[in-house]
């Protein structure tokens, strides 16, 4: 059985015991290893579906749903509950899709902004996200829009990304990645220290 206390942030535990100032989330070895595990995705374009993998780097996050005695800002290291309780983030996302003749042909690079909104139990049980990004893939650049839903303390979820400009090209072929469905995961933990 899943123990929610394993995902509780140190910020939440220590907020009642201290003034909360000077606390910074720091990566643990387990957190670093789990960030290397990509999220699987399926991309639809060119009239076919392709398997892919997505990694995400949160450059900067502001959380408006955590305890006011704790700093709402996070850089690179973000606890799941800080994100799912309500936040806005800037992110980068390298992705790899099975595409083209060589290994280098399948890389998709994305940068964007995303907002998370809690729905049930301050986002612990259910939260949603909306966002927009700019991506480059297979000589094609475009803007994309996304929506996501997350459960189980933000540990599992799914995102649907759609690119309206990724539709039919001048040569009447679809773009190689117009719609992406990603199964999200957030595993591991970070520590908070002074």
Image (cartoon, helix red, strand yellow):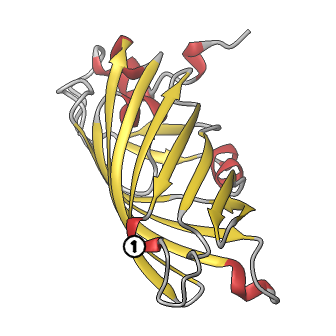
Quadrant of the drawing holding the N terminus: top right
Q: Nearer the viewer, residue 168 or 17?
A: 168
How many other residues sit within 10 Å of disc 1, few (<14), some (14-19) or many (≥20)? some
- Identify the image quadrant of residue 135: bottom left
Of residue 76 and residue 37, the one placed in the foreground of this image is 37
**Going by the image, does 191 lie left or right of 99?**
left
Q: From the image, tell me which residue sits under label 1.
A: 165
The residue sitting at the left extreme is 68
Q: Residue at x 57, y 56 (%)?
A: 180
Observer-nearest residue: 37 or 101?
A: 101
Question: Could you tell me residue 64's position as x and y percent?
Answer: 21, 34
What secondary structure is marked by label 1? helix
Residue 153 vertical placement versus 86 (above, below): above
Q: Quadrant of the C terminus?
A: top left
Specify whether 143 is left or right of 56. left
Q: Position of residue 100 (x, y in %)?
A: 76, 84
Q: Which residue is pictured at 57% across the width and 75% down the height?
A: 174
Placement of 74 over or under 79, stated as above or below: below
Q: Foreground residue, 39 or 47?
A: 47
Compared across the picture, whether 99 is left or right of 109 comes to: right
Image coordinates of residue 85 in percent, x first then y, are 33, 27
Q: Position of residue 145 (x, y in %)?
A: 37, 56
* Residue visible at 46% across and 39% down in the picture: 148
Outermost residue, front direction?
Answer: 172
């Amino acid at each position: 059985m899943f123990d929610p206390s394993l995902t509780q942030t140190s910020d939440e535990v220590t907020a009642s015991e201290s003034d909360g100032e000077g606390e910074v989330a720091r990566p643990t070895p387990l957190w670093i290893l789990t960030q290397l595990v990509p999220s699987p995705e399926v991309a639809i374009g060119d009239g076919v579906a392709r398997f892919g993998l997505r990694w995400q780097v949160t450059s900067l996050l502001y959380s408006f749903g955590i305890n006011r005695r704790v700093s709402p800002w996070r850089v690179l290291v973000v606890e799941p509950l800080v994100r799912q309780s309500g936040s806005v983030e800037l992110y980068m996302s390298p992705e790899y899709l099975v595409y083209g003749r060589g290994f280098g042909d399948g890389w998709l690079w994305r940068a964007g902004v995303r907002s998370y909104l809690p729905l049930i139990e301050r986002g612990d049980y259910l939260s949603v996200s909306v966002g927009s990004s700019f991506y480059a893939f297979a000589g094609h650049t475009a803007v994309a829009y996304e929506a996501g839903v997350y459960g189980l303390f933000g540990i599992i979820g799914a995102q649907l990304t759609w690119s309206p400009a990724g539709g039919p090209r001048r040569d009447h072929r679809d773009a190689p990645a117009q719609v992406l469905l990603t199964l999200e995961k957030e595993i591991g933990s970070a520590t908070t220290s002074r």
